[in-house]
Each structure stands twice: as structure tokens, then as C-alpha cells.
Image (spheres, rainbow, N blue to C red):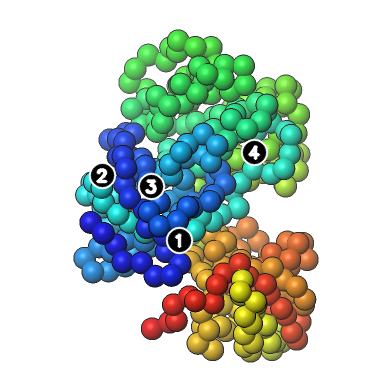
């Protein structure tokens, strides 16, 4: 099956389909029209046409730039999930789909510190990408805490075991299984299995153990909301810097809007990658993206929640405030990064520089 593209979309062909668990598949993808540069931990916005309806979904890359020749996304079928059902059950090798360029800020920092990864279920997907990238490109140690129901539900089970054997001195994997159906033994010392749930107490004890060897690591958390919440709260309570704690949310929450009285009218100058510029007004309490849409100006966006970063631009002058799932930020403490979908101007004028081309499709 072929797909029709617009200017921003990239065609991909399914080269392989790997059944990771009964509900989860990895799709190995080959770009057909152009390369797709990406960083470990980022995601693709996959665009599907199902029953004559265009559907966009975010899927984390499970491949890593320096260890995999082709792209790969890993998809878990969810109840009543139209896109996930199509990708896990219907799509086959040779079919095509479309994507937008890779995006996301769940990436490795420029740091020499070791890495602690905490995952549950399909949350292992971006963490597997990060794990491979760290081990392939650095001398850092990686500690993975991975929670599942049983061994059959462990995504990348065989691949994780192979990486643990290959990097026995630098990779430590601990699987928590809430309902194990097989023996908990392991043939290698640096990959172990324990029965039970991933509790706050266990997280604290393991973090203390790992940080006694590797002080002040960076933490990457992805999985069900409960695991992310207890992991983040425990690590915060232990006194680690907030800048060292990173998490990726698969569920986009509704963002609360601020009181319009806090803002005044503004004018935005938006400069595209080809240096073409447009100007448009923003009413008090209106996001920059909504104001652009009202003015019939197309800016890049996807999630409209400040998560995917597709809408990001660099603030060159003026100031804006952003309301995200992580709290309130402004362009000063974000070093100029502006997510237009959740950004409200604080100054009478603001200038933004974008990496996007002006040749985006106009609204219908």
C-alpha cells in the first residue's frame, strides 16, 4: 500500500515486522525519499490513512542512530486503538506509511554522567534507544529497571539479554515481574529477575545502590503514569537535581489555560527557515499558534500540548510564557525555546525564528 505525501511528510517502507510480545510489534522502516535524522529517545509522528480518514499518532523510535542502520518504531496494541490495531495487525512488509521529521526532547544531555533508566511495559521503547546509544557511543554505565507482568510481556526481551551479554561490565538490568509464570533465574549476573511490583521503597533502594557507584546520574523514566509518578517523586525526594530527571509521557493531558487578564495584545514576527517573515496580531490570552491560525498563517504543530516540540521556534526578541503539563515556563528560563502551541506573549512584540519552511499546507 502506497501513501500520498505533502511537503513536510517523508515516505517510509516497512522492511521487517518483528513480533516482540503478543500485543507488541517492532516495524523496521526504510526512508524512501530522504533521510530521517534523529536522536536517541525521539519519536516519529506517523500519518496513516485508515477508512479514508487521516490519523496521526506519536510512536517512539526503538532504533538508535549509531547502532541501527534503519529506523524502527515499536507499537503496542491498545483497546479500541485504531492506529495501533492497524500497525500491529494489518500492515505488512512492503507497505508504506508517512512520517513527519523526528521530534522530542527526551534525549541525552551533553554529560559524562551515567544513566539510570526506569520503565514499565511499552515505556521501554525510547529507553531501549537511549540504552543502545549510550553503550555504543560512550563509556558510561547504564542501569535499567524494567517492570512487567511476566517474561512473555517483556518487550525486547531477547535483544536486552544480548546487549547485557555484550556489555556485561557497563549494563545492569533488573526486571520486576508482578505475576511471574517462569523461574526467575538468569544465566548472566548483570541481568536479574525479581518478583513483585516496582514500589517507592524499591526505587529508593536501587537508586541508592546505583548512585553509590555512579554519583549524580541522569534519570530517564517512561511507562504507565503510576510508575512515572512514584519514580519522579522518589528521585526528587532523594535530592537529585530536577535537571537530571527526564520523563516521556505517552498520554497527552489537557493543558489549563491562564487568565487572559495576565496578558496584553501583542504582535508576532515569525521568520521561517528560508528567511521569509510574516507578522500577525495576538490577542490577550491567545496562544501564538491559535493567533496564526486565525490569521490564516500556517505554523508547524502536532500535539498542541507542548510535548511533541514540532511547533518549537527560537525567541529572538521579546518574551513569552508557556503553560505545559510540566508547569509554567518562559522563554528566558527555556533559553529562547518557544512552543507556540502553549506560548502567550508577555511583550508588545515578539520575534521568533523557525526551522520550518513556509511551504506548509494552509488550513482547509
In whole angstroms, how far apart are the C-alphas of marks 2 and 1? 20 Å
Residue 359 vs 31, above or below: the answer is below
Q: Quadrant of the N terminus?
A: bottom left
Instruction: Name the residue that disc number 2 marks.
Output: 93
Secondary structure category for the residue under label 3: strand
Within 10 angstroms of label 1, few (less than 14), some, or many (20 or more) residues?
many
> In whole angstroms, how far apart are the C-alphas of marks 4 and 2?
36 Å
Q: Nearer the viewer, mark 4 or mark 3?
A: 3
Between tags 1 and 4, which lies in front? Answer: 1
Query: Which is nearer the N-term, disc 4 or disc 2?
Result: 2
Residue 194 location (% of width, % of height): 48, 20
| Label 4 with label 3: CB-CB less than 8 Å | no
Residue at point 52% right, 18% down? 166
Q: Position of residue 18 (x, y in %)?
A: 31, 36
Mark 1–mark 4 distance (CA, rounded to whole Å): 28 Å
Q: Compared with residue 269, is residue 49 higher up or lower down, i.e. above or below?
A: above
Camera-side residue of 351 and 178 = 351
Q: Quadrant of residue 355?
A: bottom right
Quarter of the image for residue 56 reads bottom left
Residue that mark 1 sits on: 100
Q: Nearer the viewer, residue 53 or 239?
A: 53
**Horizontal and vertical percent position of residue 297:** 53, 84
Give the crowd class for mark 2: few <14, some 14-19, many >=20 residues within 10 Å.
some
User: Looking at the picture, does residue 30 appear above or below residue 324?
Assistant: above
Mark 4 lies on a secondary structure that is: strand
- Which quarter shows the C terminus? bottom left
Residue under numbered circle 4: 219
List the residue tagged with mark 3: 30
Amino acid at each position: 500500500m502506497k501513501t500520498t505525501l505533502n511537503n513536510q511528510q517523508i515516505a517510509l517502507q516497512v522492511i521487517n515486522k518483528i513480533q516482540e510480545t503478543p500485543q507488541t510489534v517492532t516495524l523496521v522502516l526504510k526512508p524512501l525519499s530522504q533521510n530521517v535524522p534523529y536522536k536517541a529517545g525521539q519519536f516519529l509522528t506517523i500519518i496513516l490513512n485508515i477508512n479514508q480518514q487521516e490519523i496521526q499518532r506519536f510512536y517512539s523510535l526503538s532504533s538508535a542512530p549509531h547502532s541501527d542502520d534503519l529506523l524502527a518504531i515499536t507499537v503496542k496494541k491498545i483497546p479500541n486503538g485504531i492506529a495501533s490495531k492497524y500497525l500491529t495487525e494489518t500492515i505488512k512488509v512492503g507497505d508504506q506509511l508517512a512520517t513527519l521529521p523526528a521530534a522530542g526532547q527526551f534525549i541525552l544531555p551533553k554529560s559524562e554522567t551515567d544513566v539510570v533508566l526506569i520503565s514499565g511495559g511499552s515505556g521501554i521503547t525510547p529507553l531501549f534507544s537511549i540504552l543502545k546509544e549510550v553503550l555504543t557511543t560512550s563509556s558510561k554505565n547504564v542501569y535499567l529497571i524494567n517492570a512487567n507482568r511476566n517474561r512473555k510481556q517483556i518487550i525486547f526481551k531477547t535483544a536486552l539479554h544480548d546487549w547485557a551479554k555484550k556489555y556485561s561490565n557497563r549494563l545492569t538490568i533488573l526486571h520486576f515481574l508482578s505475576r511471574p509464570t517462569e523461574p526467575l533465574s538468569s544465566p548472566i549476573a548483570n541481568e536479574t529477575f525479581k518478583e513483585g511490583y516496582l514500589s517507592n521503597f524499591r526505587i529508593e533502594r536501587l537508586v541508592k545502590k546505583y548512585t553509590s557507584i555512579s554519583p549524580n546520574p541522569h534519570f530517564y523514566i517512561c511507562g504507565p503514569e503510576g510508575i512515572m509518578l512514584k519514580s519522579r517523586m522518589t528521585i526528587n525526594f532523594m535530592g537529585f537535581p530536577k535537571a537530571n530527571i527526564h520523563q516521556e509521557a505517552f498520554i497527552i493531558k489537557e493543558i489549563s489555560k491562564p487568565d487572559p487578564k495576565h496578558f496584553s495584545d501583542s504582535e508576532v514576527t515569525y521568520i521561517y527557515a528560508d528567511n521569509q517573515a510574516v507578522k500577525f496580531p495576538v490577542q490577550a490570552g491567545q496562544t501564538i499558534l491559535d493567533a496564526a491560525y486565525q490569521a490564516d498563517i500556517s505554523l508547524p504543530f502536532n500535539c498542541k500540548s507542548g510535548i511533541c516540540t514540532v511547533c518549537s521556534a527560537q525567541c529572538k526578541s521579546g518574551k513569552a510564557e508557556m503553560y505545559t503539563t510540566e508547569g509554567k515556563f518562559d522563554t528566558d528560563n527555556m533559553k529562547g525555546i518557544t512552543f507556540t502551541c502553549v506560548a502567550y506573549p508577555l511583550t508588545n512584540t515578539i520575534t521568533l525564528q523557525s526551522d520550518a519552511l513556509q511551504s506548509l499546507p494552509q488550513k482547509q
